Structure formats: C-alpha cells, structure tokens
Image (cartoon, grey):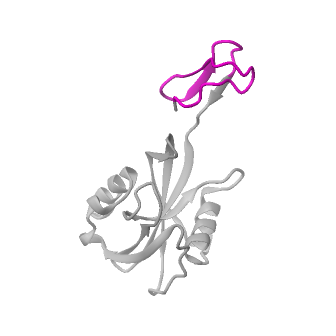
Amino acid sequence: MNDLKYCPKCGNETLNWDGEKKWSCSNCDYVLFHNVAGAVAVIIKYDDEVLFTRRNQEPKKGKLDLAGGFVDPKESAEGTCVRELFEEMKIKVDRSQLRYLASLPNTYEYKNILYNTIDLFYEYEVSEKVEFQLEISEISETIWIKKDQINLEDIAFDSQKLFFETYTKS
C-alpha cells in the first residue's frame, strides 16, 4: 500500500495511506478509497463430500481452495458463482439452485497490495460426481473430501478455514 506515493490528480509525491482504507493527498485534497472487494466461494457438495480445488497460482499456490472469485462490476454474487464455475471448471450452474450460506471478511494479497474482501459462501449440490475441465492456469486439480476429514491447515484462506470450522459440524 505504501508503494502508491504520487497523487493521480496533481502528480505530487504527497499521497498518504491511512493504514486502513484510503489514500489522501496533502497537496490537493484528493482522496482515493480502497473499498472492500466482493468475492464468492462455492461449496460444491455431493452427499457428505465437498469439492476442493488446488490453487495453481499465487497467492497460496498448492493449497486447497473453493471454486469462486471476485465479483465484477455490475455483476451479482450469484452471477459471479455461475461465471466463475464455468470459467474455472466448465460447470454449467442453475443459479436458482445456489444456496447462500454466510459471509466472512478476509484479506487477499496480490502483487504487494493487500485487498480487504467480503467472502460470500454459497452451496451447490450435485447429484453425481463428474469430471471437470479445469482452467490449469488457476487450478491444478480437484479433490473430493468428506466433510469430517477436512484438514483446515490445508486450506488457503482464513475465511474458508473459519467457515469450515462451523460447516463441518452441521
């Protein structure tokens, strides 16, 4: 966050980060907000198993993750679920069958910028296990894990770890 020093309005090296959510220019009073980004995570469920993906890129390359991603401008969270599942695994999802479960705050570091996110968790139940066509640049493999055998230390992101602490008990 401290890498941004030059004001995009006046061009002076007077942009200051407040440590939480905004940069302010002491020269021209310009303010740039760093708002929370919306993201979705989809629990694809079959019987008592959950489908995890293995991350094939940083951050947290090699760790377990849920299918999902960031909400694009002018896109609903459910629309993001549909888009991301298709982009990542070529799954066509009936959005009416997505079930919202919870939201949790999280952070996501990308290229030395720490983004605050609100992660929205959805569940999508499937009637059979199928093979997925993976977007290898993002996912190296998929793994079905029984709910009672999920190891929280294998999961990439803190919000998902926190979510699964409760979800595995239900």
Magenta region includes residue 24: yes
Magenta span:
2-30
Q: Is residue 121 above or below residue 67?
A: above
Q: Is residue 6 magenta?
A: yes
x, y percent for residue 152: 28, 60
Residue at point 50%, 54% (across, down): 120
Q: Position of residue 145 (x, y in %)?
A: 32, 75
Extreme residue toward the top, this view: 27
Taken as a whole, is the magenta stretch helix, strand or loop?
loop
Number of callouts in the render? 0
Q: Is residue 56 above or below residue 74?
A: below
Residue 89 position by quadrant? bottom right
Which is nearer the eye, 48 or 60? 60
User: Is residue 94 depicted above or below 101 in this figure?
Assistant: below
Q: Residue at x 28, y 68 (%)?
A: 150
Q: Quadrant location of the C terminus?
A: bottom left
Residue 112: horizontal and vertical position, in percent?
A: 49, 41
Horizontally, is 67 left or right of 22 in the view?
left
Please provide percent x and percent y for residue 113.
52, 40
Give the residue at x 51% y 42%. Answer: 115
Nearest the camera: 17 or 168?
A: 17
Q: Is residue 58 left or right of residue 158?
A: right
Outermost residue on the right side: it is 9
Of residue 165 and residue 64, the one placed in the foreground of this image is 64
Task: Indicate left or right for 32 with 129 as reference.
Answer: right
Where, by quadrant of the figure, is residue 155 drawn? bottom left
**Residue under the image location 69 percent in, 20 percent down:** 30
